Amino acid sequence: MLQFFRKYNRYILAIGVSLLMVAFLVQPTMQMFGPNPQKRTLGYIDGAKVTALDIQEAANQLGLLQYVLRAGVGAYEPMQWFLMRHEAEEVGAVASLAQAAEFLRNTGIGEQELSQIAERHRITIDMLYAAVRDWITVQHYSELLYGVTSMPLTLKASLRGLAYLQTLRDSTEDHLARFLRASHGSFRVSRPLMQRFIYDYQSTVRISAVTIDTDAYADKIEIPTEQDLLELFDQYKLVLPGESEPYGFGYRYPDRVKIEYLEIPAALLRREAKKKTQEREALAYYTKHPADFLEPQPPQNSEGNNTSQDSSAPSNPKVKPYAQVRQEILNQLYRDNAKQLGQEILKAAQSMLANHNRDLDTASGYFVVDDDTNWKPMRFDKLAENLQERFGILPSWHHHDRRWFDRQGLGDLPGIGLSRLTDNGTSLFADYVFSAKELSPDSDNDLATRRLQKAIASLPLAVAESFYIFRLIDVQPAHSPASLEEVRTRVTYDAKRLAGYRMLQNDKQIWLERARTETLETIAQQLGANIRKPSPFSRRVADLLGGLTVPNIVGIGSDQVLVDRIFELASQGDDVATDVIGVDKKQVLLLVRVEEFDPITTSQFKTAVANPLVALNLITQSYVDELGSDPLAYEALVARVGYTPEVDESDPFTESQADAPTEDSGDQ
């Protein structure tokens, strides 16, 4: 054998080296031809793929904006930000790069600082402008969703630039002064309260987590007995779903309605308005309002002198050429004319409906409509056809006579779910619906004066430049089921989940030992589950009214006990902080590993304390009694945009209880 190796050692060495080189080269080559993780499909919007690269770009943009705008960005997740930008573009609330540049100038960020920021983040100046443009776009879009009244072009122009910023600053200072005056009375901001407020808002944690569902005990869960079902039914039959503690069980039917509505989409209105808007209108506006289109003034130094090289240049600003601002003017005219057209169509629809109802008697402000009358409501599909004949636009007819909608279901309806009454711009669609006569609204309910009732068309509503009219097909006040049989499927499902969750809780220490001795990756693989790695989140985030609320962790949800335990775990300072936390509302255990904890530093705390808006937010929080539903929440965005995640449908954190029975699946 040794003689063989001595004789052929040159060949063996050459072959061995060649094999090593091939192995070294093949691995990266195979990786190159393998799937690219950044191109992994996360979901779909109208058939178009949403990839991991898209969300990574959104995360990078959020990080950049957080650095540039500090506290003005908002506590958004990357996927949430991506969906917001997408919907903003869909509704046409798109800002321009010129607006971004003007905004940065007005906020005091000069070209030198912009260059430094771009160099620090390894991007171009244009990419920075694009990020700020997207932020302004989202602000415009947020105004539409939250019901801020849209300004006409003349008013908006008068508030542009520094004048607008000064108006905003004066308003903020007025609110701040008012709240600070109140703090000298019954409410004061103590330093410990300030510390907790800032800590909750600015400290962040990053985790990895694996969900242990009751499916892990599916073969051990026994079929519940009739006595078990009756006990569970009796315990929760008077409670609405989601309102019981700690599990959220409830079998009482909420107030609910069946509905149909006409939609006049903004896209159709803009298309029609674009046909009818003439160039001369834009020219007339440009000629009449030259002050709206002045060239930006060069920056001034600390002494108030012009920093441009040509100090002898005249100080009178020049008007931008018409070609430069033409599209901006046209876009605004399209929106204004589309809105006017939509209002005209609404008036015509109301006139047709009123003419159809003219023979009905009234009592206490409501029409008298009962089974004894021969009157039938005007069909909405016929109304849509009549409007098309007159205006050339066919409104969309949405008819839901086989499904009951509660308040949340109404809010999730595309478009109309976020609409508001046009007569005041503040009353929400769902609030208006549940002021209906058949639901016996309270005497102090302002919306009861609108006299909404079944079978009679509503007042007009609008959102994002689209318009709506609806009609209640049927109305059912809240009531409890008469017997177990009405909701047997739901009660059986809950009983099995509860039995499985109790098994999980009993084995909690076993799962904790596994989490500390094995990797999350190994456990996830054995369970056939995914490892969740949400973006870093803070203990509390700002809500709509300036207070703080528990963050919605993407893929996990909003749970105060869970979030507080995670931050308690992170603050212990262990190298590997791991725990098993029960999520009662979902009846699952969550294996959590803290990957990174970023507490607030002393210098950050001092900076925050010196910011008067922090005190304003803290004082505002004391006046917040109840948080309304947020149209920018992840779940609302997903439902409205039509985003379909590419996930395991059995995952309790990503499905809407797909396995749970609904009232429409048999429990009527």
Image (tube, rainbow, N blue to C red):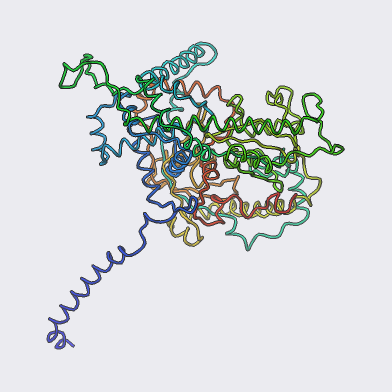
Q: Does 365 sit above or below residue 115?
A: above
Residue closest to the eye, 431 or 331: 331
Q: Nearer the viewer, residue 548 or 346?
A: 346
Asked if residue 200 shows in the view, the reply is: no
Whether residue 17 appears in this view of the structure is yes
Q: Is residue 372 above or below residue 290?
A: below
Residue 660, position as x, y percentages in the image: 65, 53
Quadrant in the picture for the N terminus: bottom left
How far from the left and from the top, in percent, is residue 375? Answer: 81, 37
Q: Quadrant of residue 20?
A: bottom left
**Which image quadrant for residue 287?**
top left
**Residue at the right extreme, as displayed:** 372
Residue, x 75% and y 53% (percent of image)? Answer: 488
As drawn, is 467 to the left or to the right of 50?
A: right
> Residue 240, how many percent across, how many down?
70, 40
Q: Nearer the viewer, residue 59 or 349?
A: 349
